[in-house]
Amino acid sequence: MSSGAAPALKVNNVSKTYGGLRALEAVSLTAFPGEVVGLVGDNGAGKSTLMRIVAGAQPPTSGEIEVDGQARVFANPIDAVEAGISTVYQDLALAMHRDVVANFFLGRELVSPGWLGRRLGWLDRPAMTARTRDELARLQTRIPNVEVMCRELSGGQRQALAIARAAAWCRRVLLLDEPTSALGVKQQHEVLELIRRIRDRGVAVVLVSHQMQDVVSVCDRVTVLRLGNVAARLGKDEITVENLVAYITGARVADRGSALQEDS
């Protein structure tokens, strides 16, 4: 958290314009190791734009991103991953016709030692299976059979798999885009518990969500965006559904002083 620790992620005065349209205006945000920071706002507030910038999917027009106190410039998402940032988008990026193990190692497959791996690209399936089981067990993810096809998993299990996969390769920051949308109440609860376990491992989590009750339940701090600007920053004791809705809709306006002061 913020007491003496350096932020895992720091977004400094990031702006983004598309021609004459300004999507973000000098937005700042910090996320410390071992906390969940909510990013909320109405449609068009700039949440997705900020997520794409931090994930390396598009550059900012101005501003700076720091990871562990070091300024970073991301030319593409691979740069962000190498800096320790993992992202789970709403589409999850899962291959439905492949099993849990194959999805867990998608793009990171392990080849067998020896000439089979070097010459033929033979995959080390036993090692991949063992690692997948270990990681899912460590995060207490409820997928009992790692050899089942992804299309046979429930919506909650698919979401948990995508998050657990990102967390396994994530070193510093995990970005989650609407992780509980389209899930039932029980599945939402399981995903929120998974997010808490990832936070407790010292990862900084940035959660984008329209589910206000989920934000109240799991977030340590919240940044509210409205029309591309920071409308409010809320501490744990201020995070209520009523406050979130009031700032999102503009019914309540934060003081331009302490209420908008970013932690550093």
Image: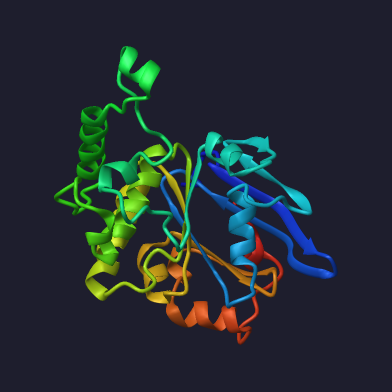
Q: Is residue 96 visible?
A: yes
Residue shown at 27%/26% (left/top)? 124
**Front-most of residues 8 and 143:** 143
**Front-most of residues 137 and 236:** 137
Quarter assignment of residue 214: bottom left
Where residue 12 sits: x, y (%)?
Answer: 70, 50
Where residue 145 sits: x, y (%)?
Answer: 15, 49
Q: Residue furthest left?
A: 144
Residue shown at 45%/36% (left/top)? 171
Tally of numbered discs: 0
Q: Residue furthest bottom?
A: 251
Residue shown at 70%/69% (left/top)? 229
Where residue 168 sits: x, y (%)?
Answer: 36, 40
Quarter assignment of residue 66: top right
**Front-most of residues 107 and 6:** 107
Q: Is residue 196 visible?
A: no
Quarter assignment of residue 220: bottom left
